[in-house]
Structure formats: C-alpha cells, structure tokens
Amino acid sequence: VIDNATLDMLFRAIEIPEFWRDKLTKIAYNPYTRVDTRRMHDLGVLSDEELIRSYMDQGYDSEKALKMANFTIRFNAEGNAQLTRSAILESYREDLLSTPRQWTY
C-alpha cells in the first residue's frame, strides 16, 4: 500500500519518535505461521537457529521457542519415516512392489 519512505514521512508527520519507527515497521510484517515454520525447517529452508527465532517471532518466549523447536525437529524426523512407510505400503497396494522387497526398507 505504501513504501518505507512514505511510512517514514507519516511517522515524522505524527511525531513518532525515531526510537520507535524501526520497531513499528518491523512488527507490521507477519511472521511465518507454525505450519510454515515446521515445513520450511523440514525442507532445510530454516536452520535450527532460524527455527527458534521463527517461534520467538510468533510470540513464544525463549524457553517455549526452544521446546517448540525440539518438537519440530523430532516431528519432522518421525514424519519423514512415516511418509516413507506410507509410500512403501501404497506402492505395495498398487502392485508396484513385491512383498519381500517391501520389508527391506
């Protein structure tokens, strides 16, 4: 709707102190959602450190953000194993995989 220069003009016009201008601009943007955060970490887009920061951006304190990050890491690790298992079983159902080979995965 407006660019940063226009926003800065507004802040000056309504006499927002400089101390607050950058902070108000930063909170105007939406953080990633929890689902986006989990998926982005699973795909390697977010590192473990960025994962914690993302949860803090969503409003979690440092303790809860760390626990959410630990949960996400474990959930993603288990999710990939389950996805693989599901893919194998689906391949078996569609006769793309024989029974003996199915159990080697």
Image (tube, rainbow, N blue to C red):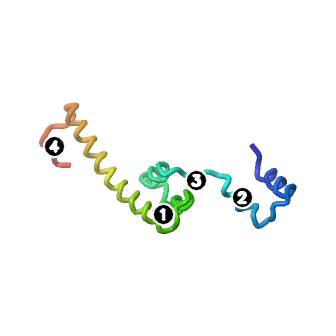
* Quadrant occupied by the N terminus: top right
Residue that label 4 marks: 101
In the picture provided, is 82 more to the left or to the right than 73?
left
Which residue in the structure is indicated by mark 3? 31
Q: Position of residue 2 (x, y in %)?
A: 77, 46
- Distance from disc 1 to disc 2, alpha carbons, whole Å, reads 23 Å
Marks 2 and 4, how far apart in space? 58 Å
Q: Nearer the viewer, residue 97 or 12?
A: 12
Query: Which is nearer the eye, 12 or 40?
Result: 12
Crowdedness of circle 1 by 10 Å Cα count: few (<14), some, many (20+)? many
Mark 1 or 2, nearer chain start: 2
**Which badge, 3 or 4, comes first in the chain's sequence?**
3
> Viewed as shown, does residue 57 lie left or right of 86?
right
Residues at marks 2 and 3 touching, judged by CB atoms closer than 8 Å:
no
Please state which amino acid type lies under the numbered disc 4.
Answer: Arg
**Separation of disc 2 and disc 3 at Cα?**
14 Å
Quadrant in the rendering for residue 66:
bottom left
Residue hosting label 1: 65
Query: Which residue does the image show at 80% across and 53% down from the upper left?
Result: 5
* Mark 4, other Cα within 10 Å: few <14 / some 14–19 / many ≥20: few
Task: Identify residue for label 2.
Answer: 24
Amino acid type at image mark 3: Pro
Q: What amino acid does circle 1 point to? A: Ala
Look at the numbered disc 3 and give the secondary structure of its residue: loop
Between discs 1 and 3, the one toward the N terminus: 3
Mark nearest the camera among 1 and 4 is 1
Q: Which kind of residue does numbered mark 2 sit on?
A: Leu
Mark-to-mark CA distance, 1 and 3: 14 Å
